[in-house]
Amino acid sequence: MNDFLSDLGANGDFNIGSSKDNDAPSIGKWLLYLFLLLIPVVNIILLVVWSIIKNNKSRKNFSIATLIMLIFIVAVIFSLYYFIGFDKIKATVSNFNKSTVSKYLNIGGMFG
């Protein structure tokens, strides 16, 4: 309990993290993790592996949160296709062509 209060700054010492957070990855490692997540298919594999491995709690929590968001986004996309229909979405996208972009942006012949 005393460690909890000291982490909150109750004794005047404002510790951001406790000694348990010393295994947090450095900025360089986070940049490497984010770069690896840009690679298709590898990103899903890494997120699943990182969410199972228990050696780094911050990376594990990040991967679990990312997988939850990924599942949510995929569910929203599939529900849009189901309720709106693929044909209407395709028609809307095809109607928004290059001339529409140049008309709204008022940039003339830049897009043809």
Image: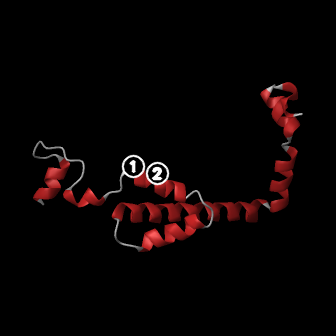
**What amino acid is found at the position of numbered circle 2 in the picture?**
Leu
Asked which secondary structure carries label 1, the reply is helix
Query: Within 10 angstroms of label 1, few (less than 14), some, or many (20 or more) residues?
Result: few
Location of residue 79 by image quarter: bottom right
Q: Residue at x 47, y 55 (%)?
A: 32
Location of residue 53 by image quarter: bottom left
Query: Does residue 35 appear to the left or right of 87 in the view shown?
Result: left
Q: Residue at x 17, y 56 (%)?
A: 4
Location of residue 58 by image quarter: bottom left
Q: Which residue is mark 1?
A: 27
Query: Within 10 angstroms of label 2, few (less than 14), some, or many (20 or more) residues?
Result: few
Query: Does residue 12 appear to the left or right of 93 in the view shown?
Result: left
Measured as percent of width and height from the top left, residue 102 is found at 83, 31
- 58 shown above or below 93: below
Q: Residue at x 41, y 55 (%)?
A: 29
How many numbered marks appear? 2
Asked which secondary structure carries label 2, the reply is helix
**What amino acid is found at the position of numbered circle 1 in the picture?**
Ile
Relative depth, front residue between 97 and 81: 97
- Given contact means CB atoms under 8 Å apart, are the residues at marks 1 and 2 in contact? yes
Relative depth, front residue between 83 and 87: 87
Query: Does residue 6 appear to the left or right of 102 in the view shown?
Result: left
> Which of the image's four quarters has the C terminus?
top right
Measured as percent of width and height from the top left, residue 17 is found at 24, 52
Q: Which residue is mark 2?
A: 31
Measured as percent of width and height from the top left, residue 62 is found at 43, 60
- 80 shown above or below 6: below
Residue most extreme to the bottom: 52
Measured as percent of width and height from the top left, residue 26 is found at 36, 52
Query: Does residue 9 appear to the left or right of 59 in the view shown?
Result: left
- 52 shown above or below 110: below
Q: CA distance from mark 1 to mark 2?
A: 6 Å
